[in-house]
Amino acid sequence: SAKYVADFRVWRGSPAGGGLEDFKVAVNEGEVVLDVIHRLQATQAPDLAVRWNCKAGKCGSCSAEINGRPRLLCMTRMSTFTPSDTITVTPLRAFPVVRDLVTDVSFNYEKAREVPAFVPPEGVAPGEYRMRQVDVERSQEFRKCIECFLCQDTCHVVRDHEENKTAFAGPRFLMRIAELDMHPLDAAAESGLDRRRTAQEEHGLGYCNITKCCTEVCPEHIKITDNALIPLKERAADRKYDPLVWLGDKIRRR
Ligand code: SF4
Ligand code: F3S
Ligand code: FES
């Protein structure tokens, strides 16, 4: 569509409080929401805080909510809306506001640190790892994650339940545990770390009731629920009552 003036409603404020402010901003053909936010900064609200970096959907910085839906500002085309729509832009709801559209996402860094790293197999040097192509592809899907945390923001387990945050790692980090648990060369079990049991007992896998909202908002179209969370749940359930079964299985697979 050609050039027009759009109605924008943007949340302004700080941890102390804030509210929605209305603006009329010019829109050009082919623009994304971030372009319009930048024009708003340039013309009417120079102190508007917004986090962004790549403008290409790859850095994961520009996460916010547009009309209540978690999205990347740089990947949401203005052509998604009609010129008569009011476009409401608010900060990620599950994380504390720093200022305006910028939130403090350190919850996610804390959760990342709680997931034990890949345990290299003994006696195999890096560069000598050999894996079946199907196992490589499985990991590769999960490694497309740009850490935008839109999935973490949307999951109902924490979205309106601050009290669940200590017990629940969220879809992005349960996916990381699934990736490691499915990795044929991960030697966690041999070193005494049962990733499936800790997924349940320490990272809150049981809180996920597979609503798939995380998958719906993922800008990388990773099938978080179907390919990571459900398989991890199945693997955790199989082994739950017999620790020797999982250890035996883990050793046999190598
Ligand atoms: Fe973002 Fe998808 Fe990674 Fe979640 S899994 S942080 S939605 S890229
Ligand atoms: Fe939450 Fe995704 Fe499970 S939205 S409940 S982690 S399927
Ligand atoms: Fe990098 Fe949007 S600015 S993902």
Image (tube, helix red, strand yellow):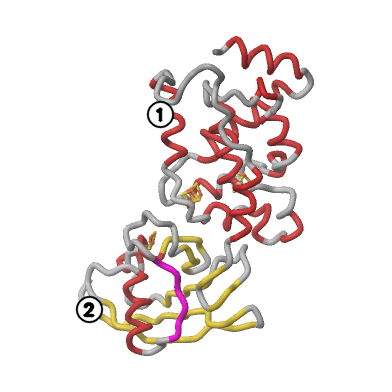
Residue at 46 percent across and 86 percent down: it is 22
Picture coordinates of residue 231 (x, y %)?
Answer: 58, 29
Q: Which residue bears the numbered disc 2?
A: 3
Q: In which quarter of the image is residue 48?
A: bottom left
Q: What residue type is labelled 1?
A: Glu
Magenta region: which residues?
47-52
**Amino acid on which the number 2 mark rests in the picture:** Lys
116 displayed left or right of 123: right
Name of the residue lying farthest toward the top? 252
- Give the answer, above or below, for where 217 lies relative to 237: below
Residue 212 position, x and y percent, is 56, 45
Residue 134 drawn above or below residue 73 = above
Measuring 40% from the left and 87% from the top, which residue is drawn there? 46
Residue that lies at the very extreme toward the bottom in this rendered image:
44
Is the CB of the residue bearing disc 2 within 8 angstroms of ligand 3? Answer: no
Which residue position is annotated with label 1? 137
Q: Quadrant of residue 81?
A: bottom left
Q: How crowded is mark 1: few (under 14 residues within 10 Å), some or many (20 or more)?
A: few
In percent of width and height, residue 35 lies at 32, 73
Give whichever of discs 2 and 1 has the lower sequence position: 2
